[in-house]
Amino acid sequence: PGRKVFLAEMVVFCRKIKCEMIESSKKIRLVPSNYQDVLASHKNKKTRLQSLLMLDCGLRVTEVVKLQAKHFDFYRREVAVESLKKREEGVFRNIPMTDRVFEALADWMEKMTDRRNPETYLFPAGKGSFKSHMDRKQVWRRVKKWTDGVASPHDLRHTFATRIVSEGNDIRVAQKLLGHASQATTEIYLHVP
């Protein structure tokens, strides 16, 4: 009987912890403008482009690291992002590139050795990696480092969504750009004063 009581108490404790974690994860954190400036003007071309793709295009960190040269339409100034949240493969959303993203992309692609191959990953994995593209955790660590631990890649996405709506766009515009199926999900992202 003592063991069953202990296990029951542990289940209650774990549920309480899980609920607290879910509530705390729903707190919206926007990236302060001084850190946005640090990331947007970073001297490291890779860090700058990765940050801007999340901050100005609203991409998820995993979407950023999986980008290939073929996903960019330079004439239309758009990036085609394969949605991670869709059940079917091959579902893309087209996102316009800001001038900052376009310039950062041009700067970064100058450094790429295999930029003419459409299958080339924008951020290839390092030597000895079993992946063909950079790991998302590396990007996460970079953002944390350059914002003194204040912001995460997901905070950049929240900042993007809030900016889109604050500029007078309908919430459905933000929903489409973020790749959300539900408007309710997009509302979680917003912090509009």
Image (cartoon, rainbow, N blue to C red):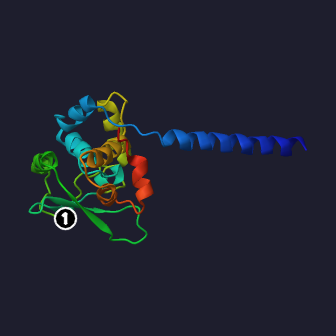
What's under tag 1, amino acid-wise? Lys
Residue 25 located left or right of residue 98:
right
**Callout count:** 1
Give SS at disc 1: helix
The x and y percentages for residue 2 are 88, 40
Q: Which residue is mark 1?
A: 70
Q: Quadrant of residue 36?
A: top left
The N terminus appears in which quarter of the rendering? top right
Q: Residue at x 37, y 30 (%)?
A: 149
The image quarter containing residue 177 is bottom left
User: Can you name the residue that lies furthest to the right here?
Assistant: 1
Judge the density around disc 1: few (<14), some (14-19), many (≥20) Cα neighbours within 10 Å: some
Q: Position of residue 75 (x, y in %)?
A: 8, 63
- Position in image of residue 29 (x %, y %): 39, 37
On the rendered structure, is 89 left or right of 1? left
Q: Does the image show residue 129?
A: no
Task: Tell me if I can see residue 81 in this picture.
Answer: yes
Q: Is residue 165 left or right of residue 114?
A: right
Above or below: residue 64 compared with residue 26? below
* Residue sitting nearer the eye, 46 or 85: 85
Q: Nearer the viewer, residue 173 or 36?
A: 173
Q: Quadrant of the C terminus?
A: top left
Q: Is residue 34 above or below residue 80?
A: above
Residue 151, how many percent across, how many down? 36, 35
Q: Residue at x 34, y 58 (%)?
A: 175
